[in-house]
Image (spheres, helix red, strand yellow):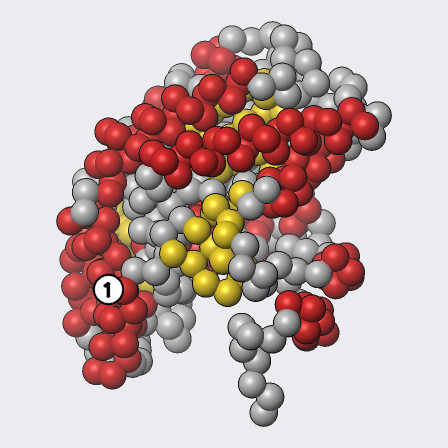
Amino acid sequence: MQQITNHLPTAELQALDAAHHMHPFSTQDDLAESGVRVITAAKGVMLTDSEGEEILDAMAGLWCVNVGYGREELAEVAARQIRELPYYNTFFKTSHTPVIALSAKLAQLAPEGLNKVFYSSSGSEANDTNLRMVRTYWAEKGKPSKQIIISRWNAYHGSSVGSGSLGGMKGIHAQGGLPIPGIEHIDQPNWWAEGGDLSPEEFGLERARQLEAKIDELGEDNVAAFIAEPVQGAGGVIIAPETYWPEVMRICREREILFIADEVICGFGRTGNWFGSQTLDLKPDIVTIAKGLSSGYQPIGGSIVSDEVAAVIGATEFNHGYTYSGHPVACAVALENLRILEEEGIVDRVREDTGPYLKEKFESLTDHPMVGEAKITGMMGSLALTPDKSARAAFAAEAGTIGYMTRERCFANNLVMRHVGDRMIISPPLVITRAEIDLLIDRAWTSLDQGMAAAKEAGLWHSA
Ligand code: PMP
């Protein structure tokens, strides 16, 4: 067997990658032609590539490396757990200490009344669990007609058949026969792009009331749950107007439906509290978790379930589970990750210190001629790119064209900042320092300048 190491020349690694590795959410042929960037190491908020370049990772991987890269404690705990008990399942009347300890800790941190955890290895699987759990819940309550789950366009809940259907990404729905039946979507609360002449407050109410109208249209007796991210992440870091969530909570309270808060991104400090539900005063029946739960050091996800739902599900056999549900190594690493977040005061620092600092700096990017709005909560933010701020205009070019051009400039300037359509998004590790925030903003400004210049040069500086 050939040994493949970091010491191979970059071109050789790229060729092997192109020959044998299929990348998620990518056009393989384009990638093969351009060549991937090979990441060889990381520390704190910085990645190193095979050419020795240092890249500021303003996305924390995929919104997940909350405690930053290179934490020795997590490596130690994983090694210790692999030696002691590398694997055992929890299907057949057994359990183990890492899963017991992690579950008790999550119950302590979770919003009030949520005290039990069902595990998966990812956010997608956790939402698949939720889909089956809420339908089972109503069937067990003697209301088997309550099956439909309402979600939002542009939501991201995963890319498996179930979770991809729950999500509202048209690109995902277009492939493989999704969505499955019994899932309905309402519009997202994106005031910048869709608010028209309404004030943000009016628009927030209008979008929230779409939930009520949808429940009426379908009949309350047919609706099981509403699922939503507290802040839409992959949809472009869409922070709803202030009127939105209180109205959604009123509707959920008045109607007999469950609320699933998908906190895969918002959980574990991202918004400056342990959960986005605490930041936005939401009252979920189920919370989806993954990503920051282990800071991405191990694949682990889950559903934190309310006492009421757990009691109903607990009375029957729930025919569901994964080989790696409650994996001992993943649980041990997650528990240590939570200890680091808590004992180092990282969540509090986001809320009280580095979060407000990032907000001030990030909002200053609205001084840039291409930036229409900057929205940010804790350590997740987005910029709307526009050729005409006062009109909140979209570009005439296909959505995402200018965003992609700008993202390419960021990457060339050693800054990982993604684009969703023509919104630029960030979600840095929660341990980012003030000096690193300054560097982020500096590189972002330069990249915006270059993206704007490239758009003008390509003749794309026009409103739709
Ligand atoms: N829910 C949300 C809100 C997410 O952002 C993601 C991943 N980006 C998922 C679910 C799916 O998680 P995974 O990729 O671990 O399956």
Between residue 369 and residue 313, name the one nearer to us.
369
Q: Quadrant of residue 448?
A: top right
Q: Please say whether residue 58 is visible from this viewpoint.
A: yes
Q: Position of residue 111 (x, y in %)?
A: 23, 41
Q: Residue at x 84, y 25 (%)?
A: 459
Classify 259 as above or below 244.
Answer: below
Q: Position of residue 114 (x, y in %)?
A: 22, 47
Q: Residue furthest right?
A: 459
Of residues 120 and 82, which is closer to you in this image? Answer: 82
State whether label 1 is within 8 Å of ligand 1: no
Q: Element under label 1?
A: helix
**In the image: residue 63, left or right of residue 115:** right
On-image quarter of the C terminus: top right
Amino acid type, residue under disc 1 in the picture: Glu
Name the residue: 51% across, 49% down.
55
Residue shown at the point (25%, 71%) measured from the top left: 76
Tell me the quarter of the picture where residue 330 sits.
bottom left
Image quadrant occupied by the N terminus:
bottom right
Residue at 57 percent across and 52 percent down: it is 164
Q: In this image, 22 relative to 429: left or right?
A: right
| Residue 142 visible at all | no
Q: How many marks?
A: 1
Query: Dot 1, crowdedness within 10 Å: few (<14), some or many (≥20)?
Result: few
Reply above or below: 315 against 409: below
- Give the answer, above or below, for where 6 lies relative to 190: below
Q: Position of residue 359 (x, y in %)?
A: 39, 25
* Residue 138 at x, y percent in the picture: 37, 49
Would you name the residue on which mark 1 appears?
Answer: 73
Q: Is residue 428 left or right of residue 345?
A: right
Residue sitting nearer the eye, 200 or 400 = 400
